[in-house]
Image (cartoon, helix red, strand yellow):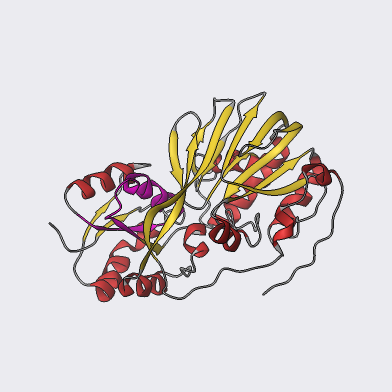
Amino acid sequence: MPSEPYIIVNPNANTGKLGKKIDFALALTKEYIGDFEYVVTERPQQEIELAAEAIKNGYKTLVALGGDGTATNMGDAIIGHPDVTLGLLSAGSMCDWHRTHSIPYDLEESLQILAEGHSEKFPAIKCSGDKTCYAFDMTDGGFTAKAAAAAHTEMKWMQIGLIKYNYLALKYVLKSKNTPAKITLDDRPPIEISDLTNAFAALGDDIAGFHVLPSNAEYSQKNKDLGVAIAHGMKGLNRVRMLIKAISGNHVGMKGVHLDRCRKMIVETAEPLCWENEGEIYNENSTRVEIERIDDAINVLVPKERSYKVDYDEEIYHQKFEESYTNRKFKKINK
């Protein structure tokens, strides 16, 4: 049985920048962890089969050298193998999952954490639409998912991931149409919405650089649930305004924005809604998507000591949906 880590490298991570410095990244990795085996992906989502093959061959530590998509695809293969641990090396455009657990957006600093070898169990989000897969930080449906889908085919020349995602988000926030929807959170009465704009469920706070669910990582860890954000009734400049405010989390309390909490969310829409998790699309044709938290789903190498940022009191997640039709004020606490 192999004792060394098995590293899966995505050369397309960070808008292709990683592919230009693979030799440097691997040499740096060897300085920190010694011997390892590695493979470089050749096509999208190949990480799933490569990780499954590595597990079959007896590897117990799998390491993602890339971004959220790389790590998420590997996580899909690791689910159901409690004796396998995932390491996250920051080399992607966003690395939201990494940041949720205080893994710095820096390759060398994330290597230090990998070398320490401290792991903990974390939840996953089971996402079912056109297909079933797992998210480990967030999932969303609507214009943000459309933008994520477009990122695979549009603006391939753009080398700065954050600018690319922000541009595509702006493009699709203007192009996308609202749709009637019914959203059921756990066993509560459904929320009936005549014009759903976007929906999110997450274990963390940030989605592609936007602070969509402030303080959620702290509350999801404490409550063992998911943070939910529902945007509705937004058109034109109001959508753009929400997008800009969400960069720093200032959309909290904005008219048309509702925050909530649950373990399971079912979203039924009049028209198919695009859904993604960490850049991977899992629904484009179905009008029903189910999202559910799975506890202690995966072992992840993380810092021994870390803290989750708290911006607001948890009351922001316990407002009635009807109150989202008006503007509300919530005071930041920043502790």
The image quadrant that residue 302 belongs to is bottom left
- Identify which residue, 169 or 20, lies in the foreground: 169
**Which residue is most to the left?**
1
Residue at the image position 46 percent from the left and 68 percent from the top: 103
Task: Decide if residue 140 is in sight here.
Answer: yes
81 in magenta = yes
Residue at the image position 57 percent from the left and 54 percent from the top: 208
* Extent of the magenta region: 59-86
Residue 256 screen position, x and y as percent:
79, 44
Q: Is residue 249 above or below residue 284?
A: below
Task: Decide if residue 149 is in sight here.
Answer: no
Residue 187 screen position, x and y as percent:
62, 37
Query: Number of callouts in the render?
Result: 0
Residue 21 screen position, x and y as percent:
34, 63
Q: Is residue 230 left or right of residue 285?
A: right
Q: Is residue 54 above or below residue 211?
A: above
Residue at the image position 48 percent from the left and 68 percent from the top: 105
Screen quadrant of the N terminus: bottom left
**Which residue is most to the front?**
187
Q: Is residue 309 above or below residue 209?
A: below
Residue 278 screen position, x and y as percent:
50, 48
Residue at the image position 56 percent from the left and 61 percent from the top: 222
11 in magenta = no
Screen quadrant of the C terminus: bottom right
Q: Is residue 328 left or right of residue 130?
A: right
